[in-house]
Amino acid sequence: MIQDLRENNKIKEFTDLVAWQEAHKLVVLIYQETKKFPREEQFGLVNQMRRAAVSITSNIAEGFGRQTYKEKTQFFYLAQGSLVELKSQLFIGRDIGYIRQCDFSRIIEQINNAHKILQGLLTKTKSFLNLKS
């Protein structure tokens, strides 16, 4: 289904955005990885990482639903901020021994991929904003 939408280049829902799709993959990875964390971290780092990850997809979706390019840009920037926050938390998880290096590398790769695509979405959205000025 996702491929069919891309082939038609029709973006009707926020789920059609590649930035949202890649961020969603990241959310799933984070939930899977944080299940392995110690129980005492459930309301600490686990909660923070999950909230940051979910915030990325939520802000992309909310930005998609906004009417003006200025509003869209603001929400996409919020998503980018949450992505960077999650990256910082991931380093903490690795450095205190909760995340193995191989899992860390896999998640960092997804973070970087999602970040690159989100940056492209931001650039494109800002270009529409500049056209309207």
Image (cartoon, rainbow, N blue to C red):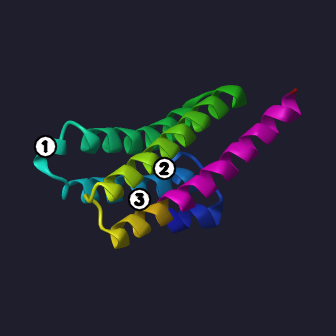
Going by the numbered disc 1, the residue's amino acid type is Glu
Q: Is residue 38 left or right of residue 107?
A: left
Real-space CA distance between mark 2 and mark 3, rounded to the nearest whole angstrom: 12 Å
Amino acid of disc 2: Thr
Q: Tell me, yes or no, whether the highlighted magenta stretch contains residue 88.
A: no
Residue corresponding to mark 2: 15
Residue that mark 3 sits on:
25
Q: Nearer the viewer, mark 1 or mark 2?
A: 1
Image coords of residue 74 (percent x, y): 63, 29
Point out the tag, 1 or 2, that comes first from the N-terminus. 2
Residue 18 sits in which quadrant?
bottom right
Residue pictured at 45% horizontal, 47% vertical: 88
Question: The magenta stretch spans which residues?
Answer: 111-132
Q: Is residue 15 above or below residue 66?
A: below
Query: Magenta span has 119?
Result: yes
Res. 96 image quadrant: bottom left
Side of 69 where 75 appears, left or right: left
Q: Looking at the picture, does residue 128 appear above or below residue 33? A: above
Q: Position of residue 106 (x, y in %)?
A: 41, 69
- Labelled pair 2, 3 in contact (Cβ < 8 Å): no
Q: Badge 2: few (under 14), some or many (20 or more) residues near its Cα, within 10 Å?
A: some
Q: Residues within 10 Å of mark 3 (few under 14, many from 20)?
A: some
- Mark carried by residue 40: 1
Label 1's element? helix
Q: Amino acid at mark 3?
A: Lys
Q: CB of mark 3 within 8 Å of CB of mark 1?
A: no
C-alpha gap between disc 3 and disc 1: 26 Å
Res. 5 in view: yes
* Left or right of residue 100: residue 10: right
Residue 17 appears in the figure: no
- Asked if residue 81 lies left or right of residue 89, the reply is right
Residue 24's spot in the image, x, y percent?
42, 53
